[in-house]
Image (tube, rainbow, N blue to C red):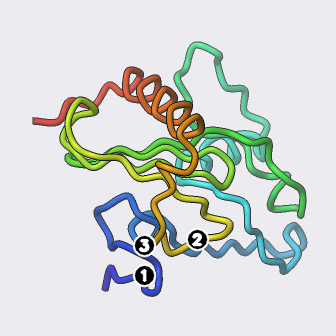
Amino acid sequence: LGDNRPLRGWKGDLYEGGIRVPAAMFWPDKLQPMKVTETIGVQDLYPTIAHLIGAKMSSKWNIEGMNIWSALEGGELPQRVLYWRTTNQFAVRKGNWKLVHNGESLEQGDAELFDLAHDPYEQRNLMQQFPELAEELRAELSRQAALDQIIVE
């Protein structure tokens, strides 16, 4: 339980084995059987359900998710930045690129850069090969962490 082999990591950390899980949705006469490969999260369910029932969502609300209905109908979602945090890890993903920072804060610890399209098991740290991309994702990680209102003690 909690082992997503052959993916690296397990429940509670920010490698793919800890955050990638399958999902199944069933809605007769509405959804056709298909495999969706878009990256979605639980935060996307609220805006999607609101869309389906015709509910209006106020722009005053800080909703992190997005309406994923188009992906469930076979379309593509716009590219977005995904952010995760635990007590000792931070991660950001943009497209197929993912930066994982291991440390209790961004000021300490080490980061790893992965190309999930070519290395879904996160075995090859590409920080040295792509320093500009690594810096871009570090900056994005800092922006996302600054918006994070969770206090970890």
Q: Residue at x 22, y 43 (%)?
A: 109
Residue 129 horizontal side relative to residue 4, left or right: right
What's the distance in space between the residues labelled 3 and 1, CA to CA?
5 Å
Q: Is residue 70 above or below residue 4?
A: above
Tag in front: 1 or 2: 2
The residue lying furthest to the front in this view is 129
Cα distance in 3D space between marks 3 and 2: 13 Å
The mark that comes first in sequence, 3 or 1, is 1
Q: Nearer the viewer, mark 3 or mark 2?
A: 2
SS of the residue at dot 1? loop
Q: Residue at x 22, y 34 (%)?
A: 105
The amino acid sitting under disc 3 is: Gly
Foreground pick, 1 / 92: 92
Query: Label 2 crowding class (10 Å Cα cut-off): few <14, some 14-19, many 20+?
Result: some
Q: Can you give x and y, in whole percent of width and height, for residue 51 in the image?
A: 76, 40
Q: Earlier in the sequence, mark 3 or mark 2?
A: 3
Q: Quadrant of residue 72?
A: bottom right
**Residue 147 at x, y = what percent?**
41, 22
Please give the residue where the numbered disc 1 appears in the rendered image.
4
Q: Which residue is mark 2?
A: 119
Tell me whether circle 3 and circle 1 mark residues in contact (CB < 8 Å): yes
**Marks 3 and 2 in Cβ contact (< 8 Å):** no
In whole angstroms, how far apart are the C-alphas of marks 1 and 2? Answer: 15 Å
What residue is drawn where x is 32% and y is 25%? 149
Q: Disc 3 marks which residue?
A: 17
Residue 57 vs 113, above or below: the answer is: above
What is the secondary structure assignment of the residue under circle 3? helix
| Residue 75 to residue 82: above or below | below
| Number of numbered discs overlaid on the protein picture | 3
Residue 32 locus on image (x, y percent): 88, 75
> Which amino acid does the dot numbered 1 rest on?
Asn
